[in-house]
Amino acid sequence: MSPFGCVREREVRDLLHQGYWPKACPEELHAHVETCRICADLVLVTRALGEERRRTMPQARLEAPGALWWRAQLRRRNAAIEKMARPIFGAEVFALAMALVVAAAVVVWQAGNWGGWIRDLPRALHLDALLPASMVDSGGGALWIVVPVLATIALLSGVVVYLVSEKQ
C-alpha cells in the first residue's frame, strides 16, 4: 500500500461500479479491503452514495428538456419586452401630462369667453353653410355642430391611441 493510493483501488472501483461488490468478488480482495484504509473508504463512500441515489431516484422527476428550454426562452423574451416597454410607458405618461397641462391652460385662458367662443366656432369654421337657414337664424346651430365634432374627435383619437398601443 502506498500513502497516495492503492494498487488494487482500480479493481475495487470497477467491481463497485459494475455492482459485483461484495458477492461476486474474490476472497483475497475482501481481505485486502479489510486491511487497506483507502479501499475500505472507497467501498464505504461508494456504497453510501449508491444507497442515497437509489433512495432519492424515484423522487427526482425532471421535466422534458424541450419544455424547460421553451420556458426559459419565454421568460427571456418577456423580460426583454418589459425592459423595452418601460421607456414607452414613461413617454406615454409624459405626453398625457403635457396634454392635460395644455388643456388646463386653454381652459384658464378662455374661461371668460366660453359662451362667445363656442357660439362663434361654426361661423369661424364656416359650418353655417352646411346648416339649414332656419337653424342659423335661431342661434341653436352652434351646439348641434360643436358637440358632434368634439365627440368625433374624441372617438377618433381613442381609436388611434388603441391602434398605436396595439402595435407596440
Image (tube, grey):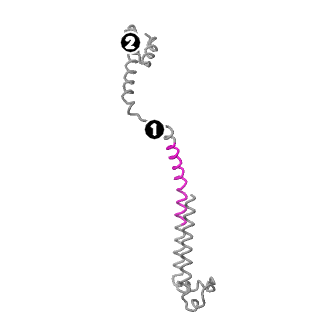
Up/down of 17 relative to 67, above or below: above
Name the spot of residue 13 as percent of width and height, x first: 44, 17
Name the spot of residue 2 as percent of width and height, x first: 44, 11
Residue receiving disc 2: 33
Name the spot of residue 32 as percent of width and height, x first: 39, 9
* Residue that appears at 53% across and 60% down: 90
Q: How many marks?
A: 2
Residue receiving disc 1: 63
**Residue 17 falls in image quadrant:** top left
Q: Amino acid at mark 1?
A: Glu
**Residue 22 falls in image quadrant:** top left
Q: Amino acid at mark 2?
A: Val
Tell me the number on the disc at residue 136: none
Up/down of 166 relative to 8, above or below: below
Residue furthest top as drawn: 28
Could you say whether the residue bearing mark 1 is in a helix, strand or loop? loop
Query: What is the quadrant of the N terminus in the image?
Result: top left
Any magenta on residue 78?
A: yes
